[in-house]
Structure formats: structure tokens, C-alpha cells
Amino acid sequence: MSVLSEHTSTDLADRLRDAYAVSAEFMADIISQTCRRFPSVGQSGKTSRVERLIQSGAWTDAAIALLDLELPQWQIRRLVYDEGEWHCALSRERELPDWLDQSIETRHADLALAILSGFVEAQRISTPDSRTSVPTVRRGISSLYGPLLVDNIG
């Protein structure tokens, strides 16, 4: 399973935006490109639930279960249907007021695709940048900094 890269994220976000409905193949693509815990050995109950929901075609429930499995720190803050579109807001801090919260907001005509769009964006934000295990040190030392000798301490 691949780690979500910027190119994959934008391609998948475009596919989600242009899609009309969810299919089993599309869910398999989303899972293979974004999920790091699926299938989860430690959470086999949640994994099998997602698989059962996909097999039965319960796309909205599958999207919510996938969000719960992969990103348990993210929760649905708001789902609103307005002028033919579903607006979905995902948040890490659901109890904070709207003006303090940094939520992800997506919209789509299909409820499951609105939730999945938010899931993909939250996954992209939550994916850590690749870093080395040893911190890097800047090489260029500014000419404003120089050694300083202080003899009179007391």
C-alpha cells in the first residue's frame, strides 16, 4: 500500500470531484492509494465491517467506517444538504467553536463522495512528510554570528 503522495492526492481528489457515484472498484482504488491501516491486523473487526459495507453497497456507511478505521482522530463535524450538494466538514477538535476549529470542508452531490473527499484531504494532511531519523543542520553560518569570549562572569 502506497503512502499518499501529492500527485496521487490531487489525482484522486479530481476523480472524486468528477465522479457521479461510488462503486466497489472506486472504493478499492481509494483504499489502495490512501489507506495505511487497511487491512488492519489489530482491528480486524473494523476492517471486516468496512469490507461488508462495501460488498453490500452501503457507500456512506463504508466511508464513515473507513474514516473511523484510518483516521480515528478525525470526526464528522457537520453534514448539510444545501442547493443540491452535500457539504461535509471533518474536524480533529469537534467541540471547539467553528471560528477556532481548523476543519476540512468538502462538497459533492453524492453524500458518500462528499465524505470520501474529506477523508482523502484529511489523509493528505495527516500524512507525515518523509524525514530522516537524524535532524539536519543548516550549513551556512551567517557573518553576523561570531565567537564571543566573556572572561568577566562575576
Image (cartoon, rainbow, N blue to C red):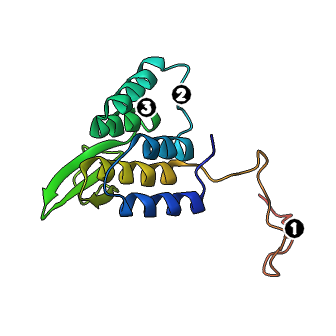
Name the residue type under label 3.
Leu
Contact, mark 2 vs mark 3 (Cβ under 8 Å): no
Q: Secondary structure at mark 3?
A: helix
Q: Tag 1: residue type?
A: Leu
The CA span between labels 3 and 1 is 57 Å
Residue under label 2: 39
- Is residue 78 depicted above or below 7 in this figure? above
Question: How far across and down, in percent of the image, does residue 145 sit?
Answer: 80, 75
Q: Earlier in the sequence, mark 3 or mark 1?
A: 3
Q: Which residue is mark 3?
A: 69
Question: SS of the residue at dot 2?
Answer: loop
Nearest the eye: 46 or 27? 27
> Are there few (<14), some (14-19), or many (20+) residues within 10 Å of tag 3?
many
- Find residue 121 and report its horizontal and vertical position in percent: 43, 55
First in sequence: mark 2 vs mark 3: 2
Question: Which is nearer the eye, 146 or 46?
Answer: 46
| Res. 149 mark | 1
Instruction: Point out the frontmost of discs 2 and 3.
Output: 2
Question: Which of the two discs, 3 and 1, sits closer to the camera?
Answer: 3
Left or right for 83, reference 1? left
Q: CA distance from mark 2 to mark 3?
A: 10 Å
Given residues 56 and 114, the one toward you in this image is 56
Compare marks 1 and 2 and give the one earlier in the sequence. Answer: 2
Residue 140 versus residue 91 in the image, above or below = below
Mark 1 touching mark 2, by CB under 8 A? no
Q: Quadrant of residue 83?
A: bottom left
Mark 2: amino acid = Pro
- Position of residue 86 in the picture relative to residue 154 (left or right): left
| Residue located at (58% from left, 61% from top) | 6
Measuring 37% from the left and 63% from the top, which residue is drawn there?
18
